[in-house]
Image (tube, rainbow, N blue to C red):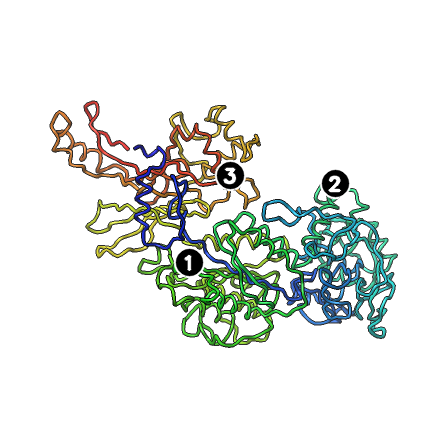
């Protein structure tokens, strides 16, 4: 049978036999499969989400401070007047009056979890001096006009309703939560809808006192009180980057092109309505904390916007942000929905760190609705942040036979912990689990997150299940696998972490990925005071748990980082290994092994060249075709009718490629052709419409790599009439100098020819039946369902034809 024909029954049987005894779920499929049997019956990895439900998740601020709140205090007099906000390249990280909210809207479930009398319940007045808090350039939680905010995505791919700008809901998942009219001037006489003015706020005030916390303060302020301000909620500020000349109050301010903190201090301490008028006359509405010029966009009255949207569209976008992203817990739910929307092949459960209820696991393929209900139906609370207790609980859930989360001895198990702050509860019972592991793991502390991660990594999670069955990468069988690689074949937990805005003393400063800890082992914290070392502790957990750590600097990045975390987790699930071919041309000194692989998560493939020592031991990976692939524009991909390029295809074939997944002509044909050629610029994770892949090489399932070089087939024993008398000379004259090539078929529709030494692709051939079939465009569909294309094994042989010898594939 030709290697270009459909998948053979015999090869399916061969795969079934070759994987017998490995770990697969019980599942019987009738008929000819369109995916490898090892995948059709494989075990999904487990993922437990450990989610922060502390009170800080309710806040509407995300500044580079310890808590993300805006801290205001009387900190310095070095310029002749007090500055309530410290500026030395950053803002004050702690102390003073803490501000958490920008849109006070009452208390209760779905609204503010902290009342206005609470230290964490204060709302920042919408005054020009603090306009920067309503700008995404400073406050990472605030509306960014350059981002399009979609409502939350549902399990079925549809969306929650668009927000009503005149009645935007505080929490769309909580029945009865308050609403707010974003389009008109708001004013109320309720304390829980008011704004708090601290002792360190300057200048005249146009607010009206609602409740008093104490007597007037000093420095010319009007006292510590809660005020009600008239303001239009649908308002934001952006930096003015043009060099507009600023008016003169006391000193000449120069231009907006420069940044000068003295400019902000003067604006802060000398603000009056009259001076505000002078400022606005120059086209500037406020000064940022760094001295930047800010322009105000009050959407209901503005006519143009930085985004280029119409007024109606800008207002709708702001309303969607307000209803679905305004607070940290809203943004987390939005990000989780987006991250899981296109994922499959995993079993997922979760819990909140304060509740720590027994975990229910849901197959994302069959119980997606249950997972999405868990994601969204979680109103905010005013709890603490027991991150370590949460991580320990996750490990205990995996280890419990009664919970039975782990079903198979080969199952891979992951925990993803999300937090916006610092652990503030301590645990016991783990000890110094990493103390004897050396760098980069060991420290001198006990019962840390790092210890928890190491404990559940090193100790078999389920001793009632067989040991040594968890698959590991091929490099683990070499004499010196990479130190960062997870080569533990016993059941264990891998730990991943995500922080929102929080930065440690190590993580986010000197170290940004887990691999950085292996390049330069950190000096782990020796104190446990509840400060920034808590972020480093979660990073330590990711290192010890052979996971990864991510930090989202704003609510927009949160969706991206959650998606990256899931992609990293799925990417670490060990791919199935397909058949192996050995190159025996140099058995005397350096036999090498070519191993083909496929990843069923995105149907990408790899071809590895691995050394085999003279004693039969497997050595290091010397080359990887997936990472050595030429750029898409330089690849040589041939068909019967020329190169496989957009301009070389017939009109009929081009029309096939222009048809989208829903059988609608979308004009993306050239993008799809380039995608098959290896262009990844239009994939979904780059903002495009096409399927995202780890590698551009397609999955290699049943096609055994075939080596073609100077092999002597011994045809000199043939009769002279069949070329036997000329074969020896043919081998001497041609085959000893011939380039060594490895051929293999892949389910990207091609048979590939790779340089046998470097595994750089020399060329590829696409059978005509695939070019004309109309099936190739489906390869780029984000909802692609696997099928076999070029799945047979190439066969090479010397052939005596027309009076001369040639080598045919």
Q: State the mark number for residue 310.
A: 2
Tell which of 51 and 550 is nearer to you: 51
Q: In this picture, is 673 found above or below 321? A: above
Q: State the mark number for residue 411.
A: 1
User: Of the residues under marks 3 and 2, which one precedes in the sequence?
Assistant: 2
| Residue count near mark 1 (Cα–Cα under 10 Å), binned few <14, some 14–19, many ≥20 | many
List the residue tagged with mark 3.
781
In this view, the mark in front (1 or 3) = 1
Residue 2 at x, y = what percent?
Answer: 31, 32
Q: In this picture, is 714 found above or below 339? A: above
- Circle 2 — which element? loop
Q: Quadrant of residue 100?
A: bottom right
User: Of the residues under marks 1 and 2, which one precedes in the sequence?
Assistant: 2
Can residue 220 be spotted in the picture? no
Tell which of 232 and 648 is nearer to you: 232
Alpha-carbon span between mark 1 and mark 3: 29 Å
Tell which of 577 and 530 is nearer to you: 577
């Amino acid at each position: 049978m030709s290697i270009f024909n459909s998948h053979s029954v015999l090869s399916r049987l061969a795969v079934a036999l070759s994987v017998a005894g490995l770990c697969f779920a019980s599942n019987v499929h009738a008929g000819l499969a369109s995916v490898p049997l090892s995948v059709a019956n494989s075990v999904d990895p487990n993922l437990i989400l450990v989610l922060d439900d502390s009170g800080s998740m309710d806040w509407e601020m995300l500044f580079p401070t310890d808590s993300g709140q805006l801290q205001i205090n009387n900190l310095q007099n070095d310029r002749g007047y007090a500055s309530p906000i410290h500026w030395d390249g950053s803002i004050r990280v702690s102390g003073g009056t803490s501000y958490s909210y920008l849109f006070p809207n009452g208390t209760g479930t779905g609204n503010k979890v902290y009342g206005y009398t609470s230290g964490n319940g204060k709302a920042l007045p919408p005054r020009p001096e603090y306009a920067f808090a309503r700008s995404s350039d400073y406050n990472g939680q605030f509306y960014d006009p350059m981002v399009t905010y979609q409502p939350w995505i549902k399990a079925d791919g549809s969306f929650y309703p668009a927000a009503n700008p005149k009645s935007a809901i505080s929490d769309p998942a909580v029945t009865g939560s308050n609403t707010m009219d974003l389009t008109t001037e708001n004013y109320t006489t309720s304390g829980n809808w008011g704004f708090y003015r601290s002792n360190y706020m300057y200048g005249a005030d146009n607010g009206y006192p609602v409740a008093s916390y104490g007597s007037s303060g000093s420095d010319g302020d009007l006292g510590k009180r809660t005020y009600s301000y008239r303001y239009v909620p649908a308002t934001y500020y952006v930096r003015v980057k043009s060099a507009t000349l600023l008016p003169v109050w006391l000193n000449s301010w120069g231009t907006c092109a420069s940044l000068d903190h003295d400019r902000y201090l003067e604006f802060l301490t000398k603000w009056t309505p009259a001076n505000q008028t002078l400022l606005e006359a120059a086209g500037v509405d406020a000064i940022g904390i760094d001295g930047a010029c800010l322009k105000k966009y009050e959407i209901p009255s503005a006519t143009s916007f930085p985004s280029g949207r119409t007024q109606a569209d800008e207002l709708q976008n702001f309303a969607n942000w307000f209803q679905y992203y305004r607070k940290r817990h809203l943004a987390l739910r939005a990000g989780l929905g987006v991250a899981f929307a296109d994922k499959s092949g995993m079993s997922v459960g979760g819990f909140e760190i304060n509740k720590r209820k027994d975990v229910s696991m849901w197959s994302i393929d069959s119980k997606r609705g249950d997972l999405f209900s868990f994601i969204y139906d979680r109103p905010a609370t005013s709890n603490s942040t027991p991150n370590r207790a949460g991580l320990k609980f996750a490990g205990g859930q995996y280890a419990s036979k009664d919970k039975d989360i782990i079903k198979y001895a080969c199952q891979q198990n992951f925990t993803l912990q999300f937090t916006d702050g610092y652990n503030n509860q301590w645990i016991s019972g783990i000890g110094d689990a990493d103390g004897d592991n050396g760098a980069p793991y060991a420290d001198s502390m006990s019962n840390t997150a790092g210890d928890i991660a190491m404990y559940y990594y090193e100790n078999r999670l389920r001793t009632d299940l067989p040991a040594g069955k968890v698959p590991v990468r091929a490099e683990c069988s070499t004499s010196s696998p990479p130190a960062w690689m997870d080569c533990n074949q016993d059941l264990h937990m891998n730990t991943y972490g995500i922080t929102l805005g929080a930065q440690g003393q190590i993580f986010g400063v000197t170290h940004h990925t887990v691999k950085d800890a292996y390049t330069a082992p950190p000096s782990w914290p020796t104190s446990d005071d509840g400060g920034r070392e808590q972020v480093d502790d979660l990073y330590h957990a990711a290192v010890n748990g052979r996971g990864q750590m991510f930090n989202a600097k704003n609510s927009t990045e949160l969706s991206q980082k959650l998606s990256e975390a899931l992609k990293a987790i799925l990417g670490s699930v060990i791919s199935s290994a397909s058949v192996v071919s050995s190159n025996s041309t140099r058995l005397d000194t350096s036999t090498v092994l070519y191993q083909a692989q496929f990843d069923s998560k995105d149907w990408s493939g790899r071809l590895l060249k691995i050394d085999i020592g003279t004693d039969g031991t497997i050595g290091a990976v010397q080359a990887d075709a997936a990472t050595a692939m030429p750029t898409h524009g330089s690849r040589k991909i041939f068909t019967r009718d020329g190169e496989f390029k957009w301009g070389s295809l017939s009109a009929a074939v081009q029309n096939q490629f222009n048809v989208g997944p829903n059988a609608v002509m979308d004009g993306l044909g050239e993008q799809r052709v380039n995608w098959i050629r290896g262009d990844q610029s239009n994939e979904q994770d780059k903002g495009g419409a096409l399927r995202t892949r780890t590698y551009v090489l397609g999955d290699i399932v049943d096609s055994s790599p075939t080596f073609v070089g100077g092999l002597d087939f011994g045809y000199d024993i043939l009769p002279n009439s069949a070329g036997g008398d000329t074969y020896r000379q043919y081998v001497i004259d041609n085959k000893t100098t011939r380039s060594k090539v490895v051929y293999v078929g892949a389910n990207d529709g091609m048979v590939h020819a790779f340089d046998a030494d470097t595994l750089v692709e020399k060329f590829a051939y696409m059978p005509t039946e695939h070019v004309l079939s109309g099936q190739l465009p489906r390869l780029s569909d984000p909802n692609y369902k696997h099928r076999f294309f070029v799945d047979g094994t190439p066969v090479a042989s010397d052939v005596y034809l027309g009076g001369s010898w040639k080598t045919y594939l």
